[in-house]
């Protein structure tokens, strides 16, 4: 009788284990399917229109805005139009960028409305191109993500630290710390019809770094990356700048006469 009871117990445990395994596999499949659907959604976008916002921490916990980036990105050409609105260290400024065929151009709001079509080539000027991401493709929070679990209508994911750092302004993080190799940031990606919303927890990503490396990074200025992306309804192509001039030589008011 004892042997029979033991056999029944083992059989029952085996059945329970198989059911649990099947359930977990089903959940993973659902998470993967939801993430795959969002990857397919961004892959179909002709021009990706996106808005990124860097905050000190999760806005739900009182995080403060550091700056905004608005952009249009063409997957077919790799060209980008970006606009930065920042208030870093209390210095408010609005700057436009255009990246075409490997060249980076700059237009400042201080030049006035008459210089709206005028651009300075800043390809070799890191001081003025610091706000540009190293990787201009804004779909990295979805394309590089690993599904972890369902989260509401979205998916909680892990995003490689390298993708996070190269997807944010290069001036904040000139290089990816070696200690972050293999580390993931926790994030949530969620579809809202034609819009995909992203929240990346950068604060906790830093916890993986040794104290000596962490001390060299301005982590207080990079705690949360909030983002939306959608297909642009403006079908206009991203094209080379109309007027290119050297503002050190020619006043912006005269740039169209160069």
Image (cartoon, grey):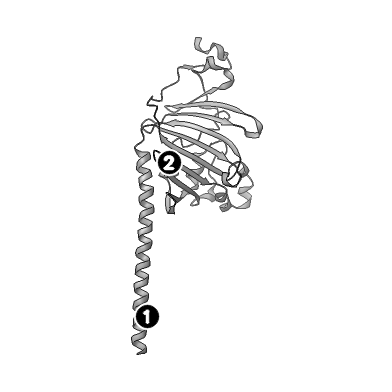
* 33 or 207: nearer the viewer: 33
Residue beneath disc 2: 196
Residues at marks 1 and 2 touching, judged by CB atoms closer than 8 Å: no
Q: Position of residue 47 (x, y in %)?
A: 39, 31
Q: Residue furthest top?
A: 257
* Mark 2 residue crowding within 10 angstroms, few (<14) / some (14–19) / many (20+): many
| Residue at position x 36%, y 47% in the image | 36
Residue 173 visible, this angle: no
* 214 or 143: nearer the viewer: 143
| Residue at position x 39%, y 48% in the image | 35
Mark 1 residue element: helix
Q: Is residue 75 left or right of residue 57?
A: left
Which label was assigned to residue 9?
A: 1
How far is the residue under mark 1 from the one under mark 2?
A: 48 Å
| Residue at position x 49%, y 35% in the image | 51
Q: Is residue 207 above or below residue 47?
A: below
């Amino acid at each position: 009788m004892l042997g029979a009871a033991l056999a029944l117990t083992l059989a029952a445990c085996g059945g329970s284990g198989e059911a649990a395994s099947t359930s977990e596999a089903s959940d993973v499949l659902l998470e993967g399917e939801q993430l795959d659907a969002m990857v397919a959604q961004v892959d179909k976008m002709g021009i990706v229109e996106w808005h990124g916002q860097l905050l000190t921490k999760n806005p739900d916990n009182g995080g403060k805005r550091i700056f905004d980036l608005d952009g249009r990105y063409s997957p077919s050409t790799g060209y980008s139009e970006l606009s930065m609105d920042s208030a870093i260290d209390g210095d408010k400024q609005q700057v436009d960028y255009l990246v075409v065929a490997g060249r980076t151009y700059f237009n400042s709001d201080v030049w006035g409305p008459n210089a709206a079509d005028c651009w300075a080539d800043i390809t070799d000027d890191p001081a003025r191109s610091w706000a540009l991401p190293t990787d201009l493709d804004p779909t990295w929070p979805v394309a590089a993500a690993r599904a972890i679990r369902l989260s509401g209508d979205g998916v909680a994911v892990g995003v490689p630290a390298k993708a996070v750092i190269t997807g944010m302004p290069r001036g904040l993080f000139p290089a990816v710390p070696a200690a972050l190799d293999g580390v993931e940031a926790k994030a949530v990606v969620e579809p809202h019809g034609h819009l995909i919303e992203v929240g990346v927890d950068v604060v906790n990503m830093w916890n993986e770094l040794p104290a000596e490396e962490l001390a060299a990074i301005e982590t207080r200025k990079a705690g949360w990356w909030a983002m939306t992306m959608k297909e642009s309804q403006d079908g206009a192509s991203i094209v080379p700048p109309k007027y290119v001039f050297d503002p050190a030589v020619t006043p912006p008011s005269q740039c169209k006469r160069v």
